[in-house]
Image (cartoon, helix red, strand yellow):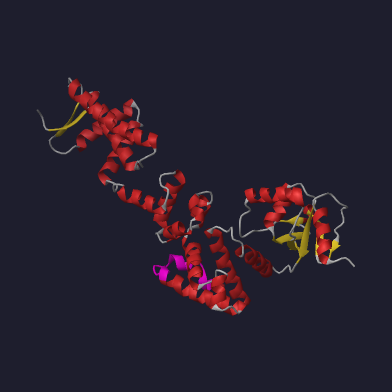
Amino acid sequence: MRSTSSSRERASRMAARPIEPSPEIVGHIFLVPLTDIELGQRLRPIDLDWADALANIMRNDGQLTPIEICKGSTAPYCVVAGGHRFVAAQRAGLAYILAREVSSDSAERRMREVQENLIKRDLDPIDRAAFMAELIALKKVQMGVDPAKDGRAASANSRWQKQLKEEAADANDTMTDAYGWSDEIAQRFGYSRRTIERDLLLHRRLLPSLVAQLRDNPIARNATQLRALAKQPDRLQRAIVELLVEGGARSVSEALATLNQRPKADPATKRLSAFIGTFQRMGAAEKKGALAQLAALLPAGFTLREGEETNKETNTAGLVAALDATFAIVAKLATGEEMVDDDEIEAARAQAQIALFEYRGIKIGGGAK
């Protein structure tokens, strides 16, 4: 009788080349056509770069580790664990893959995938946090505890820091009860109360839309930076991520420093900019009508004077000042070394428009000379 290990080695070599189209049972392992397997929903997105690396290994050495599958809904089988190996086999051009059939229970499938991924060392902090939260929820379901008690609602509460600590303590007890681990063993495998608290902080506090934006950013693999981001209010998180993604900052602290230096919006400047923007979009007839209406609304002592001789020297100075302000903004945008606030742009536009008004003989002034 052949040993199980030798059978597996033979099956591994066969997985790298086309074979007959009927699945072969090798111990508890099957050779299954890739076309009979669906990937299904994944907790962790497939990293195509990693899948390509595995594909190269499979082309040279065959498949070394079987995937786990269960009965599928839209295909005969569905991947339970080994999504990257499955995609790698597809990209390697293999027709068949080594697989072990396991329970089709959805909760059990999730549990297997989560456990497999949590023991990997290449997980980035965001994925690890998601898997940790999922594992805790699955274990609570398995133990008859309502998992909704540790949902994302905690992140919306003003006392979220206290709730996270309480949830981490509860989660740690859940993991210990579920696996019978002591604190020492839990810490060795990365399930200490402190680790769980940190993972839950990322999972509960980071907005999903921002997580997607950060996937390709170096910050995504820096747990310290992610925790600093997670501690900020939602609105500030969005502003920080915008700076990180656009290259305006290289760290959360740098983004915060940039945001703190920005001048607060000036309501008067905003109103003036809105008025000038509307006026600028008008046709000649509309502008004349608007100026006629404006003349009646001016404060006492102010008049609109039309058709008078203009002081070209004074008006040219106004244009030069407006150009200086505009050039300063363009220079900042060109080098990318400094951030330019929208209000700063609007103020420069307003200054330029007023200078053009006066240069063309349309003056806004106070008192008669």
Eyeballing the image, is 215 above or below 173? Answer: above
Location of residue 332 with respect to 125 vertically, above or below:
above
User: Which residue ends up furthest to the left in the rendered image?
Assistant: 369
Is residue 41 in sight in this rendering?
A: yes
Q: Main secondary structure of the magenta part?
A: helix
Whole-percent x, y for residue 6 in the image? 83, 62
Quarter containing the C terminus: top left
Q: Nearer the viewer, residue 364 or 165?
A: 165
User: Where residue 41 sits: x, y (%)?
Assistant: 65, 58
Q: Quadrant of the N terminus?
A: bottom right
Q: Of 129 and 250, which appears nearest the observer?
A: 250
**Left or right: 115, with 225 as reference point:** right
**Along the viewing direction, whichever of 368 and 28 lies nearer the viewer:** 28
Q: Nearer the viewer, residue 199 or 3?
A: 3
**Residue 153 lies in the magenta-colored region:** yes
Q: Residue at x 59, y 69 (%)?
A: 135
- Looking at the rendering, the stretch of residues picked out in magenta corresponds to 148-161
Left or right: 188 with respect to 300? right
Instruction: Where is residue 261? Give x, y as percent.
Output: 30, 48
Can you name the residue that lies furthest to the right here?
Answer: 1
Which residue corresponds to the image point at 50% horizontal and 65% vertical from the top-left?
Answer: 199
At a point 51% along the width and 76% down the height, the residue shown is: 170
Please count the marks in the image.
0
Q: Looking at the rendering, which quadrant does residue 331 occupy?
A: top left
Q: Quadrant of residue 77?
A: bottom right
